[in-house]
Image (cartoon, rainbow, N blue to C red):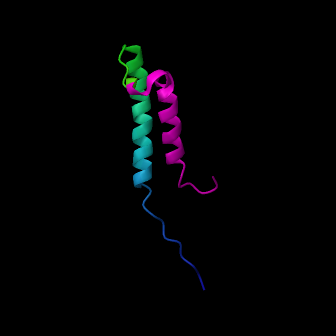
Amino acid sequence: MKTVKEEADSTSFINIVGGLLIAFAVVDFVMSFAGTNLTGFMGPVSRFSPIIFGLIGSMLLNFDKEGS
């Protein structure tokens, strides 16, 4: 008896949120050079917000991958 594994759609809600967080991290990084602080509400941690949002986004993108 053969078992068939159905492939799920690769675009899930978690992948979309992860991609949006990475895109926001890039925009936040670029806007910091323009003198605009997009994450001023975070206080002194806002200096590291592109790194934080980028890491969270990459973790969400790799969440569903096998072997991790």
Q: State yes or no: residue 64 in magenta.
A: yes
x%, y% of residue 61? 50, 47
Q: Is residue 58 left or right of residue 30?
A: right
**Viewer-closest of 46 and 65:** 46
Q: Residue at x 64, y 55 (%)?
A: 67
x%, y% of residue 48? 51, 25
User: Relative to 47, does residue 65 appear above or below in the rendering?
Assistant: below
Q: Magenta: predominant secondary structure element? A: helix
Q: On the rendered image, what quadrant is the N terminus found in?
A: bottom right
User: Relative to 45, does residue 23 appear above or below in the rendering?
Assistant: below
**Viewer-closest of 23 and 40:** 40
Q: Is residue 2 left or right of residue 54?
A: right
Q: Residue at x 39, y 33 (%)?
A: 24
Q: State yes or no: residue 3 in magenta.
A: no
Choose top left, top right, bottom left or bottom right for residue 28. Answer: top left
Q: Which residue is farthest bottom?
A: 1
User: Relative to 25, does residue 60 appear above or below in the rendering?
Assistant: below
x%, y% of residue 3? 57, 79
Which residues lie in the magenta part? 41-68
x%, y% of residue 47? 49, 21
**Viewer-closest of 29 and 43:** 43
Q: Residue at x 42, y 60 (%)?
A: 9
Q: Residue at x 50, y 25 (%)?
A: 45
